[in-house]
Image: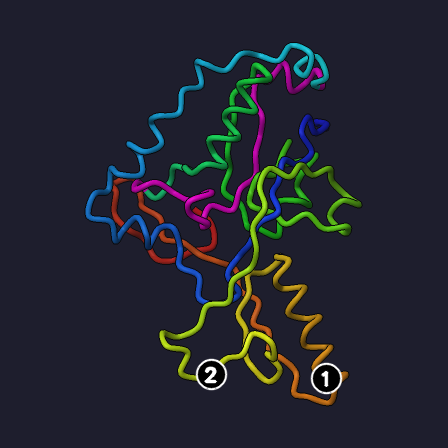
């Protein structure tokens, strides 16, 4: 069994609590399908020197394979999403994966995965998970995590907030969150607090983001969990 070289290089970041769009929708709606590719083309791996001290710490089987396997949930633009072909992962987390691999004398192999399956797969299916994770004490019990930027959470509502959603009091509302995220946990905690105070619970809808994929002829296929 391969031992993880980088158990997890992850972020303190955010997922909107409601109404997320998929990266495939964003790319499909673009007037210029080559725009995302051209933006990513400016990243120069050749300028990265191998960190010999870090590379010396790699397990022998990873060195032999020459590959750093990275699990990533590719629906979260601009961090990690799929290019116009519906198959190629791009985004700054993909760039980061390539840079880390290059600094270790390896090539990154980024695989699309369900968000809540990445951490359990580190050490067996993946060598690292880079997918906009929030660092939590519970996650630190099973993986090592590195923070490289800080962000917060947002709540998305209908234009004009016709329902009068008050972020200070979400009791009795319905909130959609992505499965396995910190927002899912926090929404559950808020709901429990509502009930403890005698108010209506929050209805928490936990959802897995989906994307559309292109077949080998470039045709858009039906929605599916993984491409």
The quadrant in which the N terminus is found is top right
Q: Which residues are magenta?
A: 59-85
**Mark 2 or mark 1: which comes first in sequence?**
2
Q: For this view, does 136 lie left or right of residue 111?
A: right
Residue extending farthest right: 141
Which residue is drawn at the image coordinates 66% and 65% (left, top)? 186
Which residue is drawn at the image coordinates 63% and 35% (left, top)? 9
Quarter location, residue 88: top left
Task: From the top left corner, tell me how far across and down residue 84 is, in percent.
Answer: 30, 42
Q: Neighbour class for label 1 at 10 Å: few (<14), some, many (≥20)? A: some
Is 211 included in the stretch rendered in magenta? Answer: no
Q: Is residue 49 above or below residue 27?
A: above
Task: From the top left corner, tell me how far across and down residue 69 is, in percent.
Answer: 58, 30
Task: From the top left corner, tell me how far across and down residue 66 is, in percent.
Answer: 57, 17
For this rendering, which residue is in front, 65 or 188?
Answer: 188
Q: Secondary structure under badge 2?
A: loop
Callouts 2 and 1 close, C-beta under 8 Å? no
Quarter location, residue 47: top left
- Report, in whole angstroms, how far the alpha carbon at label 2 lies from the one at label 1: 21 Å
Which residue is drawn at the image coordinates 62% and 79% (left, top)? 202
Q: For this view, does 164 lie left or right of residue 100?
A: left
Q: Secondary structure under badge 1?
A: helix
Please give the label number shown on residue 127: none
Q: Is residue 182 above or below residue 148?
A: below
Which residue is drawn at the image coordinates 65% and 20% (left, top)? 62
Residue extending farthest bottom: 198
For this rendering, which residue is in front, 223 or 158?
Answer: 158
- What is the image's colouring? rainbow
Residue highlighted by disc 2? 164
Residue highlighted by disc 1? 195
């Amino acid at each position: 069994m391969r031992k993880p070289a980088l158990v997890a290089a992850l972020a303190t970041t955010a997922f909107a609590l409601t109404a997320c769009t998929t990266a495939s929708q964003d790319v499909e709606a673009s007037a210029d399908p080559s725009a995302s590719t051209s933006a990513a083309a400016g990243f120069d791996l050749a300028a990265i020197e191998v960190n010999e001290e870090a590379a010396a710490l790699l397990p022998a089987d990873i060195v032999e394979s020459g590959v750093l396997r990275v699990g990533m949930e590719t629906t979260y633009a601009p961090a990690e999403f799929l290019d116009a072909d519906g198959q190629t992962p791009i985004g700054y987390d993909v760039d980061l994966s390539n840079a880390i691999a290059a600094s270790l004398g390896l090539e990154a192999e980024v695989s699309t995965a369900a968000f809540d399956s990445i951490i359990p797969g580190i050490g067996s299916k993946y060598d690292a998970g880079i997918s906009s994770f929030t660092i939590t004490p519970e996650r630190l019990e099973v993986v090592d995590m590195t923070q490289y930027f800080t962000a917060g959470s947002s709540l998305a509502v209908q234009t004009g907030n016709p329902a009068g959603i008050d972020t200070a009091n979400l009791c009795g509302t319905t909130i959609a969150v992505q499965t396995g995220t910190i927002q899912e946990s926090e929404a559950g905690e808020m709901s429990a607090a509502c009930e403890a105070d005698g108010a209506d619970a929050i209805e928490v809808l936990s959802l897995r983001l989906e994307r559309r994929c292109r077949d080998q002829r470039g045709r858009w296929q039906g929605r599916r969990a993984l491409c």
